[in-house]
Image: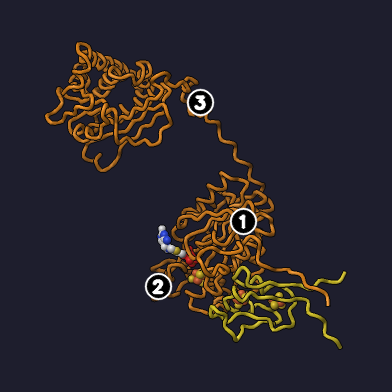
Chain colours: A orange, B yellow
């Protein structure tokens, strides 16, 4: 009689059991006759056939196929709705040896994710996209998709899709074929045996393109959704063959696989040490960290005032000088509705350790250029911190015994040198005098870098010196007790 | 005259089959059908009529369930 050998069996790259829930671990969650199941099988066959199970990463979408990761025994990531091509881009760029597949429905790819797919295709990302077009939002119960044929009644087009109201069915392959970068675009169907076997071949080719290192490949699959279409599976297959295929022409829309050359590997990123040079940030004394006792420095500075007082600029000078002093720095201007009311503030950090967050909610240095800023930010200052306030005296009821508070009329001092706008730099001088934040030369170099006009640079250098002087006057005759007072 | 032995054989996993009927539709020599019986999930699962399978494998690709169908082919005597 002779014996039989298995020629077609459950593809290896499916898990043996689908541990989605306690029962039914041997079958998918798809409705009987759902095209997703067939596409899964064709994709699994391609992965097995090419021997790339160990290096495939599948990006699942939002939609009925959201659970791709329960089925495919490959690397899996589940992306936010429509974002699979962006996630796949990141995966492919950071792991160029992996075979990255974005699997998406037509709501996912053609509605909420239109921007992602167009740009990934336009950049020619070397990924494979499997686009399951069933003309409807399956998972959410049958709302119109951009691909719904004209005249079709859906939950959101109860009178049938009308071009004047909902536009025309979106032809993704044709749309992407207007771009230069894609290497392979083809539409297939699951409408009969011939179409299914054709789809198997095309899916394999789209995967093989990536194995060969070629660019962007997309396969659009016209796929039945018997449940939402309210048809039995055989009828739904007929609908794919006769109606979907009449709207969306089956065929190849781009095949440059013969001429495309493997994409060159991206150049390795520069070494961390080289970055300052590349960014033109000066020379090697940047690695010099403040040594000795100051090595655990962590200045968390909040600068606040009204718009026009140079609050953001003062923050920038501090950060720039800190950078020069070898600290890790951050500068974060605060934008928000409060900006409209004319106040302005920024967060600055100078630290001997890498900075976890640029936000400064508990400053140990507060530079308050006006009274409202003092009221607003003083309560948050860390005990032991320092507060410089632009005024003759700390306002009534604003004192805090556990922080060092200094009031000086910085704007008036700036007026004395003829430019009230330089009050911010007068404050800078005072701060440098009161702390060992950065050296004078580092602050001067920062000003030199940020202040383009020589006239203003001179004024600022003068303002900084005046700030130091005024601060010295307050500190010189008395002990720290005086400063801690108020 | 003796009839030639079948080239193929098809096996169903009645736990996995959802009775969609796509394999029945797909089979070129029409040697499949949906059973009169229900499996314990309530599906009329697919079954082989017992003769005539060519081992073409079409039903395997048409079936949406990963392990619903397996196809075997007769080994050709060397
Ligand atoms: C940000 C966001 N918006 C909307 C939804 C709701 N939602 C879930 S699936 C889906 C559409 C799925 O349709 P499709 O991509 O065609 O996949 P199918 O289910 O038909 O396979 C929508 C709108 C969501 N989950 N997240
Ligand atoms: S609703 Fe449609 S797309 Fe979703 S699983 Fe069911 S048949 Fe498939
Ligand atoms: S292998 Fe071919 S002939 Fe055999 S049951 Fe499947 S479709 Fe029919
Ligand atoms: S195609 Fe698969 S699930 Fe559908 S009836 Fe046949 S064996 Fe069952």
| Front-lying residue, B58 or A424 | B58
| Front-lying residue, A436 or A180 | A436
Give the residue pinned by disc 2. Answer: A155
Image quadrant where residue A460 sits: top left
Residue drawn at x 56%, y 74% is A33
Residue A263 point in image, percent of width and height: 63, 45
Residue drawn at x 46%, y 25% is A281
Give the residue pinned by disc 1. Answer: A184
| Front-lying residue, A28 or A153 | A28
Please rate how many residues cluster around mark 2, counting C-alpha atoms within 10 Å: few if below 14, some from 14 to 19, many from 20. some
Q: Which mark is residue A43?
A: none
Q: Nearer the viewer, mark 2 or mark 1?
A: 2
Residue A361 point in image, percent of width and height: 30, 36
Mark found first going from the N terminus, 3 or 2: 2
Give the side of residue A175 with respect to residue A303, left or right: right
Against B65, residue A423 (above or below) is above
Against A95, residue B76 (above or below) is below
Task: Check if mark 3 and mark 2 are on a common chain.
Answer: yes
Mark 2: secondary structure: loop
Q: Is mark 3 within 8 Å of ligand 1?
A: no
Please rate how many residues cluster around mark 1, counting C-alpha atoms within 10 Å: few if below 14, some from 14 to 19, many from 20. many
Q: CA distance from mark 3 to mark 1?
A: 41 Å
Whether residue B22 is visible, yes or no, is no
Give the residue pinned by disc 3. Answer: A277
* Label 3 close to label 2 by CB (< 8 Å): no
**Chain letter for the residue marked with disc 3 in the picture:** A
| Front-lying residue, A350 or A240 | A350
């Amino acid at each position: 009689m002779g014996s039989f050998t298995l020629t077609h069996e459950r593809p290896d790259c499916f898990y043996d059991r689908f541990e989605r829930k306690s029962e039914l671990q041997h079958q998918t969650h798809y409705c009987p006759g759902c095209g997703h199941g067939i596409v899964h099988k064709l994709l699994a066959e391609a992965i097995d056939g090419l021997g790339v199970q160990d290096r495939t990463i599948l990006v699942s979408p939002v939609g009925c196929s959201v659970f791709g990761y329960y089925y495919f025994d490959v690397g899996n990531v589940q992306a936010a709705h429509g974002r699979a091509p962006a996630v796949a881009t990141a995966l492919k760029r950071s792991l160029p040896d992996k075979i990255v597949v974005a699997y998406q429905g037509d709501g996912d790819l053609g509605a909420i994710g239109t921007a992602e797919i167009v740009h990934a295709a336009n950049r020619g990302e070397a990924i494979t996209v499997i686009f399951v077009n069933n003309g409807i939002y399956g998972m959410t119960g049958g709302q119109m998709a951009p691909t719904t044929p004209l005249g079709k009644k859906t939950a959101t087009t109860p009178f049938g899709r009308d071009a004047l109201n909902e536009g025309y069915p979106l032809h993704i392959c044709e749309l992407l074929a207007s771009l230069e970068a894609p290497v392979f675009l083809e539409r297939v169907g699951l409408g009969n045996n011939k179409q299914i076997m054709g789809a198997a071949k095309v899916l394999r080719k789209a995967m093989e393109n990536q194995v060969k290192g070629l660019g962007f490949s997309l396969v659009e699959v016209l796929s039945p959704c018997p449940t939402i279409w309210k048809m039995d599976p055989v009828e739904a297959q007929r609908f794919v063959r006769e109606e979907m295929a009449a709207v969306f022409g089956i065929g190849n829309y781009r095949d440059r696989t013969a001429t495309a050359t493997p994409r060159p590997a991206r150049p390795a990123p520069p070494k961390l040490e080289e970055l300052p040079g590349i960014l033109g940030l000066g020379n090697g004394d940047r690695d010099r960290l403040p040594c000795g006792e100051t090595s655990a420095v962590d200045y968390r500075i909040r600068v606040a005032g009204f718009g026009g007082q140079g609050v953001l600029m003062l923050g920038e000078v501090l950060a720039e000088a800190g950078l020069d002093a070898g600290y890790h720095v951050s500068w974060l201007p605060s934008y928000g509705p409060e900006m409209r009311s004319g106040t302005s503030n920024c967060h600055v950090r100078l630290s001997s350790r890498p900075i976890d967050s640029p936000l400064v909610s508990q400053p140990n240095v507060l530079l308050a250029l006006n009274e409202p800023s003092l009221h607003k930010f003083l309560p948050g200052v860390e005990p032991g911190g320092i507060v410089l306030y632009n005024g003759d005296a700390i306002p009534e009821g604003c004192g805090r015994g556990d922080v060092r508070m200094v009031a000086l009329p910085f704007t008036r001092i700036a007026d004395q040198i003829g430019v009230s706008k330089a009050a911010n730099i007068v404050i800078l001088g005072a701060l440098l005098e009161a702390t060992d934040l950065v050296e004078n030369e580092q602050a001067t170099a920062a000003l030199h870098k940020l202040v383009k006009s020589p006239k203003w640079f001179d004024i600022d250098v003068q303002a900084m010196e005046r700030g130091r002087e005024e601060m010295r006057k307050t500190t010189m005759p008395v002990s720290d007790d005086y400063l801690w007072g108020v | 005259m003796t009839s030639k032995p079948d080239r193929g054989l098809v096996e169903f996993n009645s736990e996995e089959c959802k009775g969609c009927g796509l394999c029945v539709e797909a089979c070129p020599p029409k040697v499949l059908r949906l059973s009169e019986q229900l499996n314990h999930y309530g599906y009329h699962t697919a079954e082989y009529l017992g003769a005539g399978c060519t081992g073409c494998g079409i039903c395997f690709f048409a079936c949406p369930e990963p392990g619903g169908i397996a196809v075997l082919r007769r080994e050709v005597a060397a």
